[in-house]
Structure formats: structure tokens, C-alpha cells
Image (cartoon, helix red, strand yellow):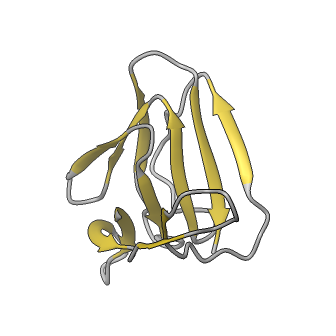
Amino acid sequence: MRYTRIARTEDGGSAFEDGEITLAHRQVADGVPAMAVGALPSKGGVQFVRSAAFDSTAHPAPREQWVMMLRGTIEVTVTDGSRRRFGAGDLVLAADTTGLGHVTTGVGEPPFEALFIPL
């Protein structure tokens, strides 16, 4: 499964990096067909968020965390001006916890829903 990492750059900015989580087919419970399963490290404290707007000013991530989009679409802009859109099912690793950070904007109709999963 592919994901996008928002990383802090050496100059204090941010950039996108592509990553992949290895999935393996396995049975997770008796009576359930095999599923694609992969590790998503977390220290707990998962948060469900719903918002009428995801619009922000430039900010670093409050902690290194996975962002799993559930509903709606956001656009993230990093400091070199690159932009990527993420919608339902997309996975982002926000790792730019210092520096200038990134800008997040809601695209389309709200609400926007996501899971924030701290590393």
C-alpha cells in the first residue's frame, strides 16, 4: 500500500516523499477470508476528526502521525510549492514536526473526516 510522507527538509521547509507499507494476505480470524494486512505503527491515542474546513496556515505537524482520510478531499502544499490531493482511503505520514511545515486546504464539499494515528 502506497503512502505519502510529509518530511522536514534540511533548510527547515517540507517536502513529499513516497513510501510503501508491505501487505501480506493472511486470515485475521476464523471464518473470515484472507485479507491484505500490513503494519501501521502507532503509540495509541488515535483521534477521529470531523471538520467543516481543513484550511490552515503553514504549520508543522503537532506530532509525527499517520493521517488516514475517511471522507472528503484535502490538498497539502509543501514549502517548494508542490501540492498533492488526498481523499478517502489515502494515507499520509505527517513527519514535519519542526520548521515551516505545510499548508492543508479542504477541497470540495465538507465535512472532512480523518483518523490521526500518532507514531
Q: Is residue 49 above or below residue 77?
A: above
Q: Is residue 34 above or below residue 102?
A: below
Residue lying farthest right? 45
> Residue 27 sits in which quadrant?
bottom right
Q: Is residue 46 left or right of residue 98?
A: right
What residue lies at 24% left-to-right and 47% top-to-bottom? 83
Which quadrant holds the N terminus?
bottom left
Along the viewing direction, whichever of 86 and 105 lies nearer the viewer: 86
What residue lies at 62% left-to-right and 56% top-to-bottom? 32
> Residue 15: image x %, image y %?
28, 67
Along the viewing direction, whichever of 98 and 117 lies nearer the viewer: 117
What residue lies at 66% left-to-right and 74% top-to-bottom? 42
What residue lies at 50% left-to-right and 43% top-to-bottom? 69
> Residue 16: image x %, image y %?
28, 65
> Residue 70 sits in which quadrant?
top right
> Residue 89: image x %, image y %?
44, 45
Q: How many marks?
A: 0
Q: Is residue 6 above or below residue 84?
A: below
Residue lying farthest top? 109
> Residue 58: image x %, image y %?
45, 50
Residue lying farthest bottom? 10
Q: Is residue 93 left or right of residue 46?
A: left
> Residue 52 sits in which quadrant?
top right
Which quadrant holds the C terminus?
bottom right
